[in-house]
Amino acid sequence: MTVRTAPSASGAAPRAADPAPVVRFERVTKNYGDVRAVDGLDLTLHPGETVALLGPNGAGKSSTLDLLLGLRHPDSGRVEVFGTTPRQAIARGRVGAMLQSGALMEEVTVRELVGLACDLHPQGHPVDRVLERAGITEIADRKVDKLSGGQEQRVRFAFATAGASDLILLDEPTTGMDVSARQTFWGAMRAQAAEGRTILFATHYLEEADAIADRVIVLHRGRVLADGSSAEIKAMAGARRISFTLDTPADETALRGLPALGGIEISGRTVRIRSTDADATVHAVYALGLYPRGLEVAGLGLEQAFLTLTDAATRKEATR
Amino acid sequence: MKTLVALEIKRTLRNKKFMFFTVIYPSALFLMIAGTAGRTALVPHTDLTMPLYYTVAMASFGALTAALMGNSERIAKERERGWVRQLRLTPLPGRGYVLAKIAAAAVATLPSIVVVFVVATVTKGVRMDAPWQWFALTGAIWAGSLVFAALGVAIGYLATGDAVRPLTMIIYFGLSILGGLWMPTTAYPQWLQDIAGYLPTHAYAALGQAIEVGDAPHAGDIALLAGYLALFAGAAAWLYRKDTRRA
């Protein structure tokens, strides 16, 4: 019964030409008292993308998801989901969402709860299929309030994927899962993406963003700090890890004054640095008259790149 | 939506403690209050005997208690724990949620009404002129209790945490006493009787009292209750939709 915008004749047309992006934030601001959680956020999600929303605690990830789901209303700006209000999009069954916190219905079994989600969705899937794809067929007859953290997350995932939604939203979906459970869960997420659904997930596991997302958005203080593929984010941070040992205990003040510093850790004579320009930093170390031993310069994982980006942004604001 | 209604009913039935006290409570009250009254003592200004009056009053009061208290506290708790927030991310319309909660309350109130009637008949020899009156009373009290189930949903949405119980109690005792569920309003001063006439509890008690004396319930009372039902259910559905509480 849902009317969907037919793809234009040129299916591979540039994304910008799409008349109705999946999600559009236009200069959205949200304050809680004096705290500005979302600060003039502009954000557009396109059909079929798998997007990771990254950011340290307090970066505005949860607030952004709340606004996207109509659980909160922006103080200014506009939030559109499939060209309409979040509430409308949800009522039409176009959005499936899994929250990070909050209890599930009590005194019912997993099958009953997932069955409820299937029934409420205008294009609900058969219960057994949803249970299987979330990997919870074995625990289908268990009471919902008697599950482990990881099992509960999978039940939430089933709840969010009970119907043919076009956008799946997951807030820190693998919290409380061990490594192998997480890997299995990623498989379920990829299966959803393979069906052409748009997926937006918030996470602080950078490994997760690296493994699944084809687009990574780094939020910092309610704004988009970086937006690109995980490789691009790493490059954007230009980050390298530098480590060395000194002959004499380090002069901290001098070291902290090094250029292009993304972060520094000094323990006795050992120095570890995150740098956005390794050449400049190393040069300056020598210029201080120091003799670094066992000097190592290495590329960073996404995690380190991310820290470099957010640290740099925090410092920039502090010196303003 | 059907699944939600069925699930809410199942959950209520599985909650054995809640069911037990809901079913036993009005009968216990009946025995305490009507226990000392003579079988033939009349209620002032009426032709009703005390036991008959209290049979209907306590059945109504018990149904009101179960519907109002059960819903308000459980819903406030569900909101606090975050379940309702998750539910709001499904296409469920507000009226579906309210309907399911009213249905769940109705499942608990019906047995409580029947048990009061059985206890009254057995212990105080309460009789009606015609058997249809028992069935009419059961139906009227049961249907009337839906109004308070809807009020319970609305209160569960207005208040949270520590506030929900006191708020429920104030509304509960206020409505019960002023509406004449504990004692006939004929004992009140005129100005209070005038106010009481507009309360849902007064119309609710009047439904039963009309049937007790062998009349049909008054259209005015039915209309008043229907109006309150629409008001409470509408308010509850609206509050469900606009609730943005975080878990």
Image (cartoon, coloured by chain):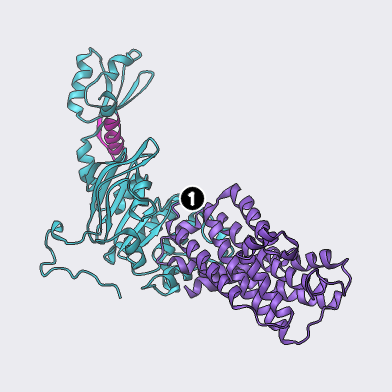
Chain colours: A cyan, B purple
Does residue B213 show up? yes
The quadrant of the rendering that contains the N terminus of chain A is: bottom left
| Horizontal side of residue B115 vs A124, given as left or right | right
- The image position of residue A139, as x and y in percent, is 53, 65
Q: A132 above or below A225? A: below
- The image position of residue A76, as x and y in percent, is 29, 46
The quadrant of the rendering that contains the C terminus of chain A is: top left
Specify the amino acid type for callout 1.
Ala
> What residue lies at 14% left-to-right and 56% top-to-bottom?
A16
Q: Which residues are magenta?
A: A297-314
Q: Which residue is mark 1?
A: B247
| Horizontal side of residue B58 vs A199, given as left or right | right
Does residue A151 show up? no
- The image position of residue A109, as x and y in percent, is 55, 67
Secondary structure character of the magenta stretch overall = helix
Q: A227 above or below A309? A: below
Crowd around label 1: few <14 · some 14–19 · many ≥20 (10 Å): some
Q: Nearer the viewer, residue B119 or A38?
A: B119
> What residue lies at 33% left-to-right and 54% top-to-bottom?
A68
Tag 1, which chain?
A: B
